[in-house]
Amino acid sequence: MTGEPRPLLGMGVPEIGSRAPQPASVPPAVRGPGHRRQGERLTTQFQELVDAFDSRRAQLTIDPSEEVDPELVLVFDLAGTIEDFRNAIDKVEGLEFLAEVLGEDDDPDDDFYLFSQSEGRLEDQVKRSLSLAFSNSEAAGQLVRLFDAWRADPDMEFARGLARFRSAFEQLRSIRPWGPSDRVRETGLLNQWRERLDVAGQFISTVRVEVELWYRKEAAARLKAEEHVVDIVTSSGGEVVRVAQIAGIAYHALLVEMPVQQVVSVLERGASAIDLLTADAVMFVSPSAPMTVAPATIEPVSAERLPEAGESTGLPRIALFDGLPFANHQTLSGRLVIDDPDEFSRDYSVASRHHGTAMASLILHGDLSARSDPLQRKLYVRPLLRPHEFIAGHEQVPDSELLPDLLHRAILRMVEGDGGRAPTAPSVRIVNLSIGVESRALVRRMSPLGRLLDWLAVDYNLLFIVSAGNHSSPIRIPAAAAEDEETAREEAHRVARALTRLRGLLPPGDALNALTVGAIHSDESGELAIPDGVWDLTLPGMPAHYGAVGPGVGRSIKPDIYHSGGRVLYSRPVASDAEGLVELVARHSPASPPGTQVAAPSRQGGNNSVAYTYGTSNATALVSREASAVFDVLEAGADPGDPEFPDALYHPVLAKALLVHASSWGERAIHLKRVLGMDPQRARRELTAILGYGAIDRSRLGAGATNRAVLVAGGSIERDQRHSYSIPLPSSLRARPEWHRITLTLAYMAPTVGQLSRYRGTKVFFDTPDERLTAGKRIEAEHHAVRRGSCQHEIIEGERAMAFVAGGALPINVDCMRDGQTLRRGNSVRYGIVVSIETRVETSTTIHDEIRATLRQRVASQLRERV
């Protein structure tokens, strides 16, 4: 039970010092087979590398008097990873480091295995990484000579800067050129082409693909690569639709239209059948599958007692990048600032404006089934969807655009301006993105969209709130499990869990610095009379089956949090297929609940229609609304006499921390543990992957209570610094064996390194408080997982007596250290931290007041010292 509401409290200014030295740890190391065995394994591969350059030279040389020196991308396939190997690569004249990506883990064998100084040889899997570098033939020859010298004398002294090649040769599984199959692996290109030709092959004359080039350091090299690929495309009868470069995320891509004959050639003869997939400048080729949103299947219904039109007066705080809303809808009129530089509105029929209308409605009003006060600030809207060219009523990201480029231009226009014009909405601090890429789930590589958001969040101090994505394919369960609703419900959970790899996050939900939102099976439409033949296969408040799941990059926690996405019912299956399986198909009517109730355009011209919808998009819009309320609290500031709140510079990251702080697993974990039959030793890890940090409890958001004190702080921390905070402990908990909870949440804007598998550049974290002082144990999210992203959220619960002296305090240390790269001296990372201490109302209703009194004494003392 929660007591009467109380305001947030500031923690005050931290004590700044140096990060404490960490005890030396020696993780298991990769053991290789030694120089003789490596010579046996790799000598032929190095010779094949030389032959590949000779072959490529012969292909490129037209005039024998002008021999061409070719460039190839080399793949160093390594057991494990080698820190700073990129620096060694760049030391070799003619080599240019491009990227490092993770490979598939391997079982140990006699050549490569992990070795621990304390335990000896381990049977754990050995990680693999691919280091990629451009090379000319002279550099390749130098590599061969270097390898031969090492093979002859493994103790040889390497030239300055090249010592990492010793480790590379010891851990090298193979070395080869980047090839056609690498360019399409994991992009889904070949599968998408097969499906398109099977369905509509005879009606297709061209296909569009996204061609991502290696981002070269020199502008001249980028131009040369681009011209070469353009020439390949046009020579084959294709057309380059769009070209984009974004230096901040090392992005260089082309949107290309190809003749269908090229597709047929690849499917019949393999990826090397066409020049585009053999071009050395090409990194990946992906299908161009712009996000498409289908319209309501039936006419929305008119509603009474909707919020009236009203003129919002405040400057926009939230930006909605989505479809074009129906601005004259009763609930939206006077509340939007629509910026449409591409003039999408010219051919955007009102009846097609359903997704942007729904998102604007949810941000401004919440679920219309529960009447709430509208936001008082205007909502800035930039349309990134437009009507589908061929399918009536559908909305789509323009198929003539590369979405990272389109979104980048939209953000720059909003915060910096374009074409010499002033920025269109510099007051925006929250960006709602309920759209993304449908075709590519996160596997092992950050998407360009995810990299873009991570970079912009740091550079422009924006809180991006993005949807995890939806997966609409039916759930197939054994017919025997479909005899009754309860059995089908439990089997649906098990099947959904087994298919998590196919239901991964959709970009930009993989963004490290964004708050990624999943959906729970919840809405405000109340109790339902469910007809025969329809099942409710998800318990209230559980993750919805339609939502994408994590983890994120580097096995970080994604989605971060969950919110109401709308309930979905399923048709009871009738007949099984040849495999003895039945399909559980979502059954949804926009004209009636369940679902979140949103404003909707009407084909009949009315301005008071509503529809019932569902999706992670809805949950994301609702979280953006909650974030705005948190900003209101932070901007109102602390009460007189209390420590001040952090400066507005830290409000975006502090709002993220407060949203996560109000989230928890609750009873969901107990249910999932039972249904999925989880091993108790692995349950926390598995539940973390499913539930993230849990679902928002709105009653705990942005406020404390008489029995719960919530303290906030924010700052900028430099590398190897420590910021130390002292949290007063309430005397009413001293020496009392009563239930208590301490929750700590840290969020920060992490610099990122797009070219490395260790994507996060800098790590900011706190150590879990001493258990002897907290008298409790960590619960919920797994200990290692909480430190892998840009948000650390830990909950400590206990019923033992807390032993501390009167006036005691809980020390919290925030540390900053190197991760993927070294933070330069003078640079800093913005962070926000939230700490709460609570107990049951029956135990104490003075927790907040006790802590507040101590904080006020500190403020008064500091004032006296200054006087």
Image: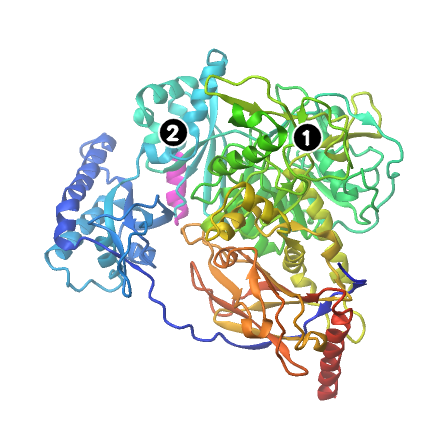
Q: Quadrant of residue 615?
A: top right
Amino acid at pointer 2? Asp
Report the number of discs.
2
Q: How many residues crowd around disc 1 within 10 Å: few (fewer than 14), some, or many (20 or more)?
A: some
Place of residue 181 in the rendered image (x, y in percent of width and height, measured from the top left): 33, 32
Which quadrant does the N terminus fall into?
A: bottom right
Query: Is residue 751 inside the magenta stretch?
Result: no
Give the colour scheme shown: rainbow
Query: Which residue range is magenta in the image?
Result: 217-227
Left or right of 268, for residue 730: right
Estimate the x, y position of residue 539 in percent, counting from the top left: 65, 39
User: In this orientation, does residue 412 appear?
Assistant: no
Which callout, 2 or 1, points to the residue nearer the camera?
Answer: 1
For residue 206, the mark is none
Q: Secondary structure at mark 1?
A: helix
Q: Which residue is mark 1?
A: 344
